[in-house]
Image (tube, rainbow, N blue to C red):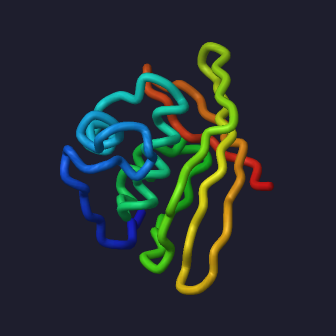
Amino acid sequence: MSFGSASYRPAPDAACPCGRAPFGECCGPILDGAVAPSAERLMRSRYTAFSVGDAGHLARSWHPRTRPDDIVVDDGTEWTALVIEDASDDGDAATVTFRAAWRHGRERGELRERSRFARRGGRWVYVDGDVD
């Protein structure tokens, strides 16, 4: 398994890329290995991982059954905003619907996905998603 792209970390008191709280109180600990308390928080940390180029976190938080062999984070894409539209949890399964705005050079766009998560061994993992 290989993980592409260099990563960087915002300062603990800097705004978290997911927009929820300072990085050190929000996604920072989850990227460092803390258990995400909900599927929504895991999804936010995965958005942040894409934002900061942390392919390792993306791999660790992906269900092994659906995880690709290679995870490459595109350095040329800047993720600019995250909006959670809906989050629901049914025991060991959850869904999170979100919109994520991006910029790549002069192009701009938005990704909308309904992501599915499962709890394995007490930890939430991303299973897959439907992109609109």
| Residue in the foreground of this view, choosing between 26 and 117 | 26
Query: What is the quadrant of the N terminus in the image?
Result: bottom left
Query: What is the quadrant of the C terminus in the image?
Result: bottom right
Q: How many marks?
A: 0
Given the current orientation, which residue lies at the most extreme right position? 132
List x then y, in percent, for residue 114. Answer: 72, 43
Would you say 41 lies left or right of 68 here?
left
Residue at point 54% right, 41% down? Answer: 63
Residue at point 35% right, 41% down? Answer: 27
Q: Looking at the rendering, which quadrant does residue 126 occupy?
A: top right
Residue at point 40% right, 46% down? Answer: 60
Given the current orientation, which residue lies at the most extreme bottom position? 106
Residue at point 25% right, 50% down? Answer: 14
List x then y, in percent, for residue 22. Answer: 29, 41
Would you say 34 lies left or right of 55 here?
left
State whether residue 38 is above or below residue 5: above
Given the current orientation, which residue lies at the most extreme top position? 91
Q: Looking at the rendering, which quadrant does residue 28 occupy?
A: top left
State whether residue 6 is above or below residue 20: below
Would you say 53 lies left or right of 62 here?
left
List x then y, in percent, for residue 128. Answer: 66, 45
